[in-house]
Image (cartoon, rainbow, N blue to C red):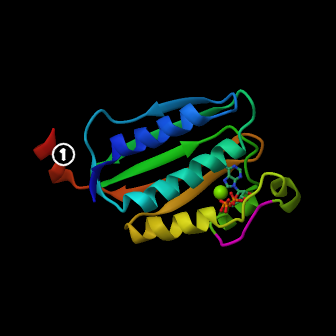
Amino acid sequence: DWVNFIDFFQRIIDRFEMGRSQNVTFKTKLPNELLYVEIDTDKMTQVLDNIISNALKYSPDGGQLRFKVEKKEREKEIVVSVADQGMGIPRENVKNIFERFYRVDKARTRQLGGTGLGLAIAKEMITAHGGRIWASSVEGRGTTIYFTLPYDPTNEDEWS
Ligand code: ATP
Ligand code: MG
């Protein structure tokens, strides 16, 4: 389906913000325009659900989640990011988190639940949509997950 990614993303953020039980604040920075992407909305919802639940799972009380979409006009893509202020990931492990069943610290993550498949599935789906996904993290400071999606620059003009 062709959807305006900004509306689509905002609805998912709202759902998490209303349903949250922790004391975590949400900040969003979204372009004030229509950005059309061709996505499988069920799959993209699954991707964002996992990224956002990870961010919440590892967020401390009083932490902040930052949601951002940036338009890269030259590359005809958008860069979507979800940043948390959680425990972060040790530098040497950041590259592994998109592998199947990979979890950074078995003891640390066991109590938080999960199988270690969420980000592997996210990577598969983002790749299938023609995008890339990566992470940047500082241990003790927080993690940001980024992904790109191609957007249609012509749709913008027609619809705005
Ligand atoms: P599942 O998503 O299948 O329920 P999971 O959340 O453990 O399980 P992934 O979403 O694939 O699995 O994440 C893999 C691992 O990467 C996590 O177990 C955790 O160790 C680490 N990780 C992912 N996101 C974050 C984050 N925002 N902050 C800190 N560590 C993270
Ligand atoms: Mg997960």
- Residue 62 placement (x, y as % from top left): 71, 27
Image mark count: 1
Which x, y percent locates residue 57?
70, 45
- Of residue 58 and residue 73, the one placed in the foreground of this image is 58
In the picture, the quarter occupied by the N terminus is: bottom left
| Residue 103 belongs to magenta span | yes
* Predominant SS of the magenta segment: loop
* Residue positioned 84% across, 53% down in the render: 111
* Residue positioned 25% across, 41% down in the render: 34
Classify mark 1: helix, strand or loop: helix
Toward which corner of the image does residue 148 lie, by quadrant? bottom left
Query: Is 157 left or right of 102, judged from the image as shown?
Result: left
Q: Is residue 26 above or below residue 37?
A: above
Provide the residue designation for mark 1: 156
Q: Residue drawn at (72%, 68%), measured in percent from left and top? A: 102
**The magenta stretch spans which residues?**
99-104
Q: Residue furthest right?
A: 107
Question: Residue shown at 38%/43% (left/top)?
Answer: 70
Q: Is residue 73 left or right of residue 23?
A: left
In the picture, the quarter occupied by the C terminus is: top left
Please, what is the three-letter code of the amino acid marked with disc 1? Glu
Tell me: residue 115, above or below residue 29.
Answer: below
Location of residue 77 with respect to 20 vertically, above or below: below
Give the quadrant of ligand 2.
bottom right
147 on left or right of 41: right
Q: Is residue 152 magenta?
A: no
Report x, y in % for residue 53.
Answer: 62, 48
Task: Sort mark 1 into few (<14), some (14-19) or many (20+) by Cα contacts within 10 Å.
Answer: some
* Residue 63, picture quadrant: top right
